[in-house]
Amino acid sequence: MNKERKLIIAGNWKMNKTVAEATDLLADLTRDLAAVKEVDIVVCPPFTALQSVSKAILETKNIKLGAQNMSENNFGAFTGEICAGMLKEFSVRYVILGHSERRLYQKESDALIAKKASAVHAAALKPIVCVGETLAEREANQTEKVLETQVRGSLAGLTKEQIVETVLAYEPVWAIGTGKTATTQQAQDAHAFIRRLLAKMFDEAAAKKVRIQYGGSVKPANAKELMSQLDVDGALVGGASLEARSFADIIKNSI
Ligand code: PEP
């Protein structure tokens, strides 16, 4: 698939996988994906498995490491938090921010996510910033309004140089882990809306460079059609990234 922006497909393992399971999964992915060069591939294990996966990832040339969250602060008295300096010890390159589960369960606000995004950039890491509407919001025709609030709020304070190094993930909350995928048209419309908004917030040239992933029940069977949309530049994959075969097939089917 010849696209203006290189696809980026990330697996969010969430609160799954022991150290042994995580290293096994990475070994299988390394074998299955060795020949893939066309896609930036990222895996985001839980914090407890970062060290072992980071060692195993040294053997691979084409799989990068991501974390699922990060503190906006850097070292100090913040019990239970993990900062950029700690993630960098394990060669982490990407950090997922503002996942809808954290927005819901940890009550993360757009303002907090913006602080975290700035901290991620300050450490020369790349954030994957998640946005997306709930089913009630979509049914009330509020999708664009919600996306605009989240995008403006979560990216507040970023510079033009930083936005082009930021990945956005459009994840309609109603499609996460539910088996319901947005139609390709719904995904493309939301992605195009986000890109137009980025052009207003930054400029046209920067907006064209930003990669926008789709997330929400992506599977091998729907990956190709989703990735063929003009403004869909990859995927953030939850459930289907927990098994090597399905994650590898999503990536291979997207090329
Ligand atoms: C996610 O949680 O980011 C996600 C997209 O999950 P799933 O693929 O399981 O819907």
Image (cartoon, rainbow, N blue to C red):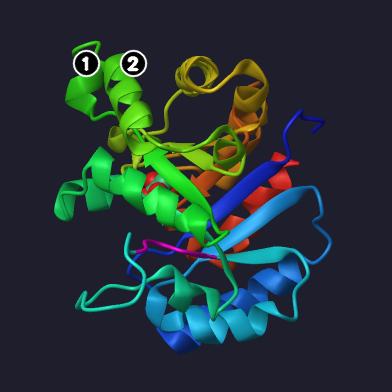
Name which of mark 1 and mark 2 comes first in the sequence.
Answer: 1
Query: Would you say 166 lies left or right of 106 here?
Result: right
Residue 177 in view in this figure: no
Whether 67 is among the magenta residues is yes
* Nearer the observer, 172 or 115: 115
x then y, percent, for residue 79: 19, 78
Q: Is residue 48 magenta?
A: no
Is 72 located above or below residue 216 in the figure?
Answer: below
Q: Is residue 56 above or below residue 204?
A: below
Rendering coords of residue 103 (x, y %): 22, 46
Residue 47 numbered tag: none
Q: Nearer the viewer, mark 1 or mark 2?
A: 2
Q: Is residue 158 above or below residue 34?
A: above
Q: Secondary structure at mark 1?
A: helix
Residue matched to label 2: 144
Note whether ligand 1 is within 8 Å of mark 2. Answer: no
Residue closer to the observer: 77 or 193: 77
Q: Secondary structure at mark 2?
A: helix
Which residue is the extreme one toward the top? 141
Q: Residue at x 41, y 49 (%)?
A: 117
Q: Position of residue 49 (x, y in %)?
A: 45, 81
Amino acid of disc 2: Glu
Residue, x 66% and y 77% (percent of image)? 57
| Residue 139 numbered mark, or none | 1
Is 92 left or right of 137, judged from the image as shown?
Answer: right
Q: Which residues are magenta?
A: 66-70
Give the position of the C terminus as an image quadrant.
Answer: top right
- Residues packed near mark 2 inside 10 Å, few (<14), some (14 to 19) or many (20 plus): some
Residue at image coords 71%, 72%: 30
Q: Tell me where residue 236 appears, x and y as whole percent.
A: 50, 47
